[in-house]
Amino acid sequence: MLSSTILAVTEGSGFSLLVPAVPDLIWGTVAFLIVALAIYKFAWPSFIAMLDERAEKIEHGIKAAEIARVEIDAERADLADQIRDAHRDAEQIREKATANAKAIVADAQEQARFDADQILDIAHRRIAADTDAARRTLRSDVGALATDLAARIVGEALTDSELAQRVTDRFLDELEVSTISAHQEA
């Protein structure tokens, strides 16, 4: 029953839900204009100031980021140069170390050759001295044996030492010549 009463009231009074009454429309428009004017007068400048401040901060941030990017690029280039220099220095150090090692090895080899040559020279001299000493000893021993043998064969002792020495030397020279010719024939 209530719904039929509301429907009856709305049909007779000319009231419409979609179109407001003229006084409501005027008062609504005036209220809207007052609120819009208050917002435009008080809130809009601070809102614009806040947006401008934010835009300025963003621009400063972009400029700072650009400056930082340029600095970082410069530092990267500098670090790349330093790394190249370090690699170049390391390569030079390796080359110097290799050259020094080769020089040390060459010096050690030269010193070893020199020492070996000295040892060989000393050994040759010692062998020559020992050979000469052995020859002299052998010659005197063989001479004494030859003289003793000759005395036994002849039956008399050789008393003349110079004669015994000459005979012994001639015998040893002939023996040496026959030994050398025997070695050459073989």
Image (spheres, helix red, strand yellow):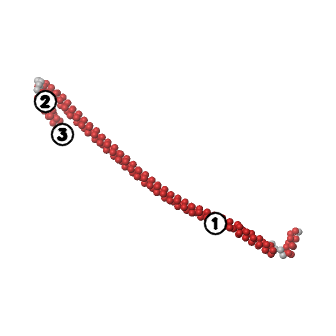
| Count of numbered circles on the image | 3
- Identity of the residue drawn at 18% across and 39% down: 184
Sequence-first tag of 3 and 2: 2
Instruction: Look at the numbered discs 2 and 1 and tell me whether their residues touch, using CB distance below 8 Å.
Output: no
Distance of mark 2 from mark 1, alpha carbons?
135 Å
Q: With 45 as the anchor, is 148 left or right in this view?
A: left
Q: Amino acid at mark 3?
A: Gln
Q: Earlier in the sequence, mark 1 or mark 3?
A: 1
Q: Which residue is mark 2?
A: 165
Helix, strand or loop at mark 1: helix
x and y percentages locating residue 37 in the rendered image: 73, 70
How far apart, in angstroms, are the residues tagged by discs 3 and 2? 28 Å
Residue 32 in the image, given as x and y percentages of width and height: 75, 71
Tell which circle, 2 or 1, labels the residue nearer the N-terminal end: 1
Q: Could you tell me the amino acid type at mark 2?
A: Gln
Query: Which quarter of the picture shows residue 61?
Result: bottom right
Measuring 68% from the left and 67% from the top, which residue is drawn there? 45
Task: Tell me the kind of residue under disc 1.
Answer: Asp
Marking on residue 184? 3
- What residue did someone put label 1 on? 52
